[in-house]
Image (cartoon, grey):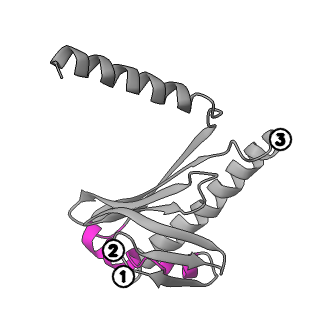
């Protein structure tokens, strides 16, 4: 097959895929980014909060690893016996998880960033598609999630700064 023919075929295939995807309604994406200054070095702060199921204590509920190894990509946790999340990425001082419910495309990232040799900050980023939430409930849902994770962040900060 000639290069020009291959390029034309690829372009048609791409156009077909683009057209097929346009039938789905556009998402209503929300990002909530919260930060907390931590009076501890980044490595020390991360050691105190890196447990994937530590969120159970932060939310005052249960959490169990149901598949994989705690802290590794692919580890699956179940929070409060109903919410299942999987680690989809990680670094030395962060991890990103996704809710396995595809309806809301929910992802969260917790990371520790050094500020000085003796201080750091937590950055908690939540991202989700609220298109499946009734329009009149979206702002309340976003506000509830922001408040819940502000509390989580405060609990993480206290744990990281504890001696």
Q: Main secondary structure of the magenta part?
A: helix
Q: Which residue is mark 3?
A: 136
Q: Which residue is mark 2?
A: 72
Q: Are marks 2 and 3 in contact (CB under 8 Å)?
A: no
Residue 118 is drawn in which quadrant? bottom left
Q: CA distance from mark 2 to mark 1?
A: 6 Å
The span shown in magenta is 39-58
Residue 139 is drawn in which quadrant? top right
Residue 38: x and y, percent? 38, 65
Seen at 50% across and 83% down, the residue is: 66
Q: Is residue 54 magenta?
A: yes
N-terminal of the pair, mark 2 or mark 3, is 2
Helix, strand or loop for disc 3: helix
Badge 3 local density, few (<14 within 10 Å), some, or many (20+)?
A: few
In the displayed structure, does residue 45 sit left or right of residue 29? left
Seen at 34% across and 69% down, the residue is: 73
Mark closer to the observer (2, 3): 2
Badge 1 local density, few (<14 within 10 Å), some, or many (20+)?
A: few
Mark closer to the observer (1, 3): 1
N-terminal of the pair, mark 1 or mark 3, is 1
Q: Which mark is residue 69?
A: 1
* Quadrant location, the N terminus: top left
Residue 154: x and y, percent? 53, 67
Seen at 29% across and 65% down, the residue is: 93
């Amino acid at each position: 097959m000639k290069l020009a023919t291959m390029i034309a075929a690829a372009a048609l295939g791409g156009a077909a895929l683009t057209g097929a995807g346009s039938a789905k309604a556009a998402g209503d994406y929300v990002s909530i980014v919260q930060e907390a200054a931590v009076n501890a070095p980044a490595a020390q702060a991360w050691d105190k909060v890196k447990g994937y199921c530590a969120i159970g204590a932060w939310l005052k509920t249960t959490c169990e690893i149901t598949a994989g190894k705690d802290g590794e990509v692919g580890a699956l946790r179940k929070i409060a016996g109903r919410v299942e999340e999987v680690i989809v990425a990680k670094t030395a001082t962060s991890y990103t998880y996704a809710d396995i419910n595809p309806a809301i495309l929910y992802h969260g990232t917790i990371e520790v960033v050094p500020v000085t040799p003796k201080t750091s900050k937590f950055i908690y980023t939540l991202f989700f598609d609220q298109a499946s939430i009734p329009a009149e409930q979206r702002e309340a849902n976003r506000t509830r999630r922001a408040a819940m994770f502000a509390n989580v962040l405060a609990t993480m900060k206290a744990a990281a700064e504890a001696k």
